[in-house]
């Protein structure tokens, strides 16, 4: 991480008392901003905080057997486990404070309603937070996790027609973006074993290649 980074949790000090979405203020436990390495090459973007993330304040955390409360099936793998297999997260680090390196985790929305997904307006309200994180981190690879994140990231950061960006069709592929490459992913807990293995193998190949772009990045 950058030498001046003091914490992985909300390292940019974004507003933790945000009230831009009144309905979500009534249902959230806390505002869940980004978490991780501010010098990361790999930035993962989900749709909204999980139930565990809402309780703890770290994106993508998921209890064993946790479902989202809106029809998603429980169980399956976790993003943390996938990052451990890639060597991007210390497997011995605390469950609620994963020691990720070269990785930043965030969401399109920062607050959770346990019974529904975010509205378009709520996504738009949080867009400045996400755009600021992407701009400040300036990652090499954006990983949209799930359909809604892919829709938002794909629309903003690629010239690929929206109809050509859908999961699982582009799962475990590389999509050229404007200044970034996208490597979309089906929600980890919804992946089959074959989908998990395919994504990991694709990402390992990407990490072994010269993925860095020439866009004035600072030296790590």
Image (cartoon, rainbow, N blue to C red):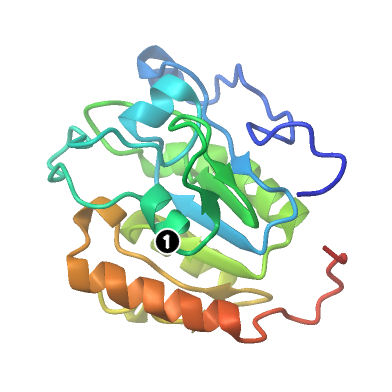
Q: Residue at x 73, y 80 (%)?
A: 213
Left or right of 64, for residue 140: right
Disc 1 residue crowd, few under 14, some 14–19, many 20+, Cα 10 Å: some
Q: Secondary structure at mark 1?
A: helix
Q: Quadrant of residue 129?
A: top right
- Residue 166: x and y in percent read 30, 72
Q: Which residue is mark 1?
A: 85
Outermost residue to the top:
26
State whether residue 15 is above or below residue 183: above
Say whether residue 161 is visible: no
| Image quadrant where one finds the C terminus | bottom right
- Residue 190: x and y in percent read 20, 56
Q: Nearer the viewer, residue 126 or 64?
A: 64
Q: Residue at x 24, y 33 (%)?
A: 116
State whether residue 117 is above or below residue 203: above
Q: Residue at x 20, y 51 (%)?
A: 76
Q: Residue at x 71, y 35 (%)?
A: 11
- Residue 199: x and y in percent read 36, 73
Left or right of 68, for residue 125: right
């Amino acid at each position: 991480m950058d030498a001046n980074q003091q914490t992985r949790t909300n390292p940019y000090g974004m507003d933790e008392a945000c009230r831009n979405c009144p309905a979500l203020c009534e249902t959230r436990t806390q505002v869940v901003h980004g978490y991780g390495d501010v010098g990361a090459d790999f930035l993962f973007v989900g749709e909204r905080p999980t139930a565990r993330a809402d309780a703890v304040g770290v994106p993508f955390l998921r209890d064993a057997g946790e479902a989202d409360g809106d029809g998603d099936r429980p169980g399956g793998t976790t993003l943390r486990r996938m990052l451990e297999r890639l060597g991007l997260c210390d497997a011995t680090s605390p469950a609620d404070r994963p020691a990720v390196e070269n990785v930043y985790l965030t969401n399109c929305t920062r607050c959770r309603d346990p019974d529904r997904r975010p509205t378009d307006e709520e996504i738009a309200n949080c867009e400045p937070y996400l755009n600021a994180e992407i701009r400040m981190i300036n990652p090499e690879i954006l990983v949209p996790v799930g359909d809604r994140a892919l829709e938002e990231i794909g629309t903003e950061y690629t010239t690929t027609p929206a109809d050509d960006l859908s999961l699982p069709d582009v799962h475990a592929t590389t999509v050229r973006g404007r200044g970034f490459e996208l490597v979309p992913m089906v929600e980890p807990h919804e992946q089959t074993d074959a989908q998990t293995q395919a994504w990991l193998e694709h990402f390992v190949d990407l990490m072994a290649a010269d993925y860095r772009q020439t866009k004035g990045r600072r030296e790590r």
